[in-house]
């Protein structure tokens, strides 16, 4: 009888685990995801700003698993784990497992500010990116016909909350668009000052990166005309106005939220299994604390056994990829009676793009901080080769080449799904 491994979530962690278990004797894998496609979050903001198409950064699971005889895909959202019966409840029915792996990533954290949850546009999913693109374009159209000064101001001010890599990348991209595209697409807005604010409660941008990277990002964004406001905690969003803890206000209809993430809590997993940021506490083999056959990998897990990362690993793609691969190795060891390998993270560095020919990159070994054009080229290649397959790499390369030479793209269509009354 084959062992049934059920993986919930086909992001970096889940997909790497599944791929490594492909065509392994004695194991059957069911990959469950609420979407029917895998996608590449680091390039979502390029979809949101109309530089890449959705199909450049996503791929259907069922096609990925052609010729993988022991892998099934099941579309559905995890709702409950019934541990005593080794069963899960999905939005699309039940599934039984011998081993369950939670690789569900994170969701946006609004820190309990309900008005922001309702009004701000996050940047976590493909749906968010499409929504951001539609919203930006829709508001630009509204700005062309606005007559009231206050209304015009709200439509011409963009606030990006969160100065991590995503916030920096969105701000930089919008600044490039303002310079190269705005007047060509919207001649009616000539002379109308579009203001881009990047705000963060911390004293620096890119807090997880080196001082050099932080300073370069800050200086570069200022030169590009982005108004960077640090030590600025967003407190609320009332009457289309962002309100900060120190009382300052910015009226805007365009609030983008990249300020934080939190993991998901699932019914049937006890409270004691969750740690900081609602991440699932796992041992050195990624087994969830207090369970026998449930594992967690990637962003949703919190592992403190790695001696180099006693506070847990950063929530990065490389951690998720490496944990997925290590768990696959350990499953094979479990079934062949070999000893297990504890997880250790091999840090490959971090990077962020700021604008055309401008990026920062921190490399751990040998320790180096690279900025400017070379960092930008490294960023392009790393991201290109990290896409899931050749088809997506070629399509992305094509779109980037067009964008580089024309300083433009032609993907700025407002496309909304039909909603039947
Ligand atoms: C905009 C953005 C930019 C980023 N840029 C970078 C970067 O440049 N470099 C970097 O290293 N990291 C970056 N990250 C972080 C990186 O994307 C994450 O660390 C990585 O995706 C974590 O992988 P994961 O497999 O744990 O989760 P994810 O990749 O988030 O995958 C989770 C999967 O689970 C599915 N899922 C969630 N809940 C359920 C449920 N209840 N039922 C069924 N399926 C479910 C989701 O649909 C998704 O497919 C970025 C993240 C974002 C959002």
Image: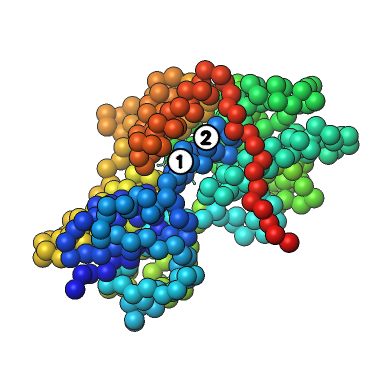
Residue at coordinates 45% horizontally, 44% vertically from top-left?
58
Q: Is residue 401 above or below residue 199?
A: above
- The residue labelled by disc 2 is 52
**How far, Cα to Cα, is label 1 from label 2?**
8 Å
Instruction: Tell me the element at label 2.
Output: loop
Of 85 and 255, nearer the camera is 85
* Residue 257 in view in this figure: no
Residue at coordinates 35% horizontally, 49% vertically from top-left?
64
x, y (%) of residue 320?
Answer: 35, 50
Of 249 and 74, nearer the camera is 74
Of 284 and 59, nearer the camera is 59
x, y (%) of residue 323?
Answer: 29, 52
Residue at coordinates 47% horizontally, 23% vertically from top-left?
401
- In this rendering, the count of numbered labels is 2
Q: In this view, does 249 lie above or below 177?
A: below
* Residue 16 in view in this figure: yes
x, y (%) of residue 128?
Answer: 58, 48
Instruction: Tell me the element at label 1.
Output: loop
x, y (%) of residue 380?
Answer: 41, 28
- The residue labelled by disc 1 is 57
10 Å crowding of disc 1: few (<14), some (14-19), many (20+) = many
Residue at coordinates 69% horizontally, 48% vertically from top-left?
245
């Amino acid at each position: 009888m084959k062992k049934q491994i059920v993986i919930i979530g086909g992001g970096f962690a889940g997909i790497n685990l599944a791929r490594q278990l492909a065509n392994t004797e004695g194991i059957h894998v069911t990959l469950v995801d609420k979407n029917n496609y895998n996608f590449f979050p680091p390039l979502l903001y390029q979809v949101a700003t109309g530089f890449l198409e959705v199909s450049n950064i996503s791929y259907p699971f069922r096609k990925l698993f052609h010729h993988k005889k022991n892998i099934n895909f099941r579309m559905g959202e995890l709702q409950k784990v019934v541990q005593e019966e080794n069963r899960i409840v999905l939005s699309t029915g039940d599934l039984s497992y011998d081993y369950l792996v939670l690789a569900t990533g994170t969701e946006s954290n609004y820190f309990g500010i309900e008005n922001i949850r309702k009004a701000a546009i996050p940047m976590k999913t493909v749906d968010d990116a499409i929504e951001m693109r539609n919203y930006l374009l829709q508001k630009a159209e509204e700005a062309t016909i606005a007559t009231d000064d206050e209304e015009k101001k709200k439509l011409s001010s963009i606030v990006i909350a969160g100065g991590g890599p995503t916030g920096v990348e969105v701000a930089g991209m919008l600044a490039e668009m303002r310079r190269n595209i705005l007047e060509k697409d919207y001649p009616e807005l000539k002379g109308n000052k579009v203001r881009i604010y990047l705000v963060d409660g911390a004293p620096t941008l890119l807090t997880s990166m080196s001082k050099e990277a932080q300073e370069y990002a800050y200086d570069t964004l200022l030169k590009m005309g982005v108004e960077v406001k640090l030590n600025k905690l967003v407190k609320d969003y009332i009457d289309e106005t962002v309100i900060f803890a120190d009382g300052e206000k910015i009226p805007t209809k365009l609030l983008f939220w990249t300020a934080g993430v939190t993991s998901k809590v699932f019914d049937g997993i006890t409270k004691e299994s969750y740690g900081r940021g609602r991440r699932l506490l796992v041992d050195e083999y990624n087994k969830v604390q207090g369970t026998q056959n449930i594992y967690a990998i990637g962003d949703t897990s919190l592992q403190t056994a790695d001696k180099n990362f006693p506070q847990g690993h950063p929530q990065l793609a490389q951690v998720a990829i490496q944990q997925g691969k290590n768990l696959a190795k350990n499953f094979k060891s479990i079934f062949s009676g070999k000893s297990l390998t504890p997880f250790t993270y091999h840090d490959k560095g971090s990077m962020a793009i700021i604008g055309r020919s401008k990026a920062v990159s921190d490399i751990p070994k040998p320790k180096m901080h690279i900025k400017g054009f070379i960092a930008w080229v490294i960023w392009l290649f790393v991201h290109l080769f990290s896409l899931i397959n050749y088809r997506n790499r070629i399509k992305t390369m094509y779109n980037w080449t067009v964008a580089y030479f024309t300083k433009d793209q032609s993907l700025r269509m407002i496309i909304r799904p039909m909603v039947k009354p």
